[in-house]
Amino acid sequence: MYHNPPVSIHILVVDDEESLRDILQRTIKSAGYECLTAGNAKEALHVLEEKNIDVVITDIVMPGDSGITLLEKVKEKHDADVMVMTGFAEGLKYEEIIEKGACDFIQKPISTKELLVRLKRVLRERAILAERNQAEKELKKSVDKLRRILEETVNALGSALEKRDPYTAGHQQRVARLACTIAEEMGLSEAQIEAIRMAGLLHDIGKISTPTDILNNPGKLSRNEFNLIMEHPQTGYEILNDIEFELPIAEIILQHHEKMNASGYPHKISGKDILIEARILTVADVVEAIASHRPYRPAFGIEKALDEISENRGVLYDPIIVDACLRLFNEKGFTFD
C-alpha cells in the first residue's frame, strides 16, 4: 500500500520507447508523484533546466547521448538523483553504474511494483539527506552566532581593561597580532593560532583587579605594588577558567609570564612544561612592551626589543620562537603599524 506523497516531488522518465514512458508515467502518477517524460537526453536536459526535478529515471541506450552521459551531466549541473534502467544486453555491472553517480538501477523488462519500491527508497534517502543538510546548516548558523557572541565578549573585556589603563591601549591587540604571525611562521595549526589570538586579546585581563593608581604609576613600583601586578596571570585565569572555551585560553593566559629557565611567574614552570602557545605569547608580549611607551618610561623601540629576545634566546625565551620573531622583523618586514 502506497501513501500519496506531496505533489511537490517531481520525477522525470527518459526513454525512447513512448509506450514504456506512458506506462511508467501512469504508474508513478498513481503513487502520487508528479511525473514528466522525455524521449532522449537532450529533451531531458531541457526539462531539467525548466523544472526542479527530484529523480531522473533514464534508459541507457537512446538516440543521441546515452543515459550514462545524461547521468554525468545531471550530477554535474543539477540537484537530482538518477536511477538507471538497463537491459541485459548493455552488459554494465551494478558497481560501474553506481560509481558513475547513479543512486540505483533496475533491469528491463521493468516491474512497475519493483520500480515504485526502489523509487520510494531513493526519495526516502533523499529526504533524510535534505533534513541532515538543513540540520547542518542550522547548526553552522548557531555555531557562527556563538562565535560572534564570544568574539564580542572578548573585545568587550579587552575594552574594559583598556579604559582602566589607557597607557596600554592597543597593547593586547598588537601582542595578539604579532603572536599569531609568529605562530603562522612556525606552521602551527589554525586551532592553535586561534587560541593564541584570543589569549593575546585577553592576556592582561587579570589587571582589571589591579588598582588604577598602580597601573598608571609613572614612577618606580614598590615591591608590594609589583607583587600585585604579578597576580594578573592568576587572576586572568580565574576570570576565564569557568568559560567553556574549546581552546586552552585560560591556561595560556596563566602561563604567559613563565620563562624557559623557571624564573617567571606565577608558578615558575619551565621549558616544555609551558604551553607552546604561552611561549609564543611571552615573546610577543615582551617585544611589544619594550618597543612601546609605558607610564614609567618612554618607548625603547623595536631594536632594543629584538636585542632583549636575542640575548635571552634559550634562557628566558624559546629559541625557535625567538628565531621566528626575528625573521618576521628582519627579513619579512613585520611592523606594529
Image (cartoon, rainbow, N blue to C red):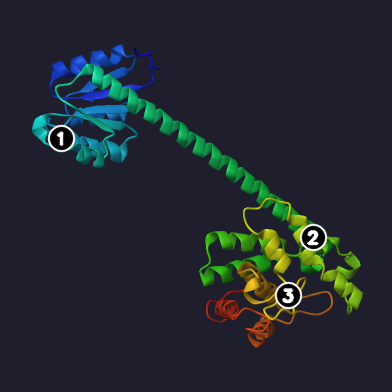
Neighbour class for label 2 at 10 Å: few (<14), some, many (≥20)? many
Which amino acid, mark 3?
A: Ala
Q: Earlier in the sequence, mark 3 or mark 2?
A: 2
CA–CA distance in space, label 3 to label 1: 71 Å
Residue at which label 2 appears:
161
Residue at which label 3 appears:
289
Label 3, secondary structure: give it.
helix
Q: Is residue 275 above or below residue 145?
A: below
Neighbour class for label 3 at 10 Å: few (<14), some, many (≥20)? many
Look at 24% across and 13% down and name the residue there: 26
Say which mark, if any, is on residue 66: 1
Q: Earlier in the sequence, mark 1 or mark 2?
A: 1
Q: Is residue 222 above or below residue 120?
A: below
Q: Percent from the top left, x then y, of residue 295?
A: 83, 74
Label 1, secondary structure: give it.
loop
Label 2, secondary structure: give it.
helix
Contact between marks 3 and 1 (CB within 8 A): the answer is: no
**Residue farthest along the bottom direction in this orientation:** 311
**Residue 280 visible to the viewer:** yes
Q: Earlier in the sequence, mark 3 or mark 1?
A: 1
CA–CA distance in space, label 1 to label 2: 69 Å
Which amino acid, mark 1?
A: Ser
Q: Percent from the top left, x then y, of residue 21?
A: 18, 19
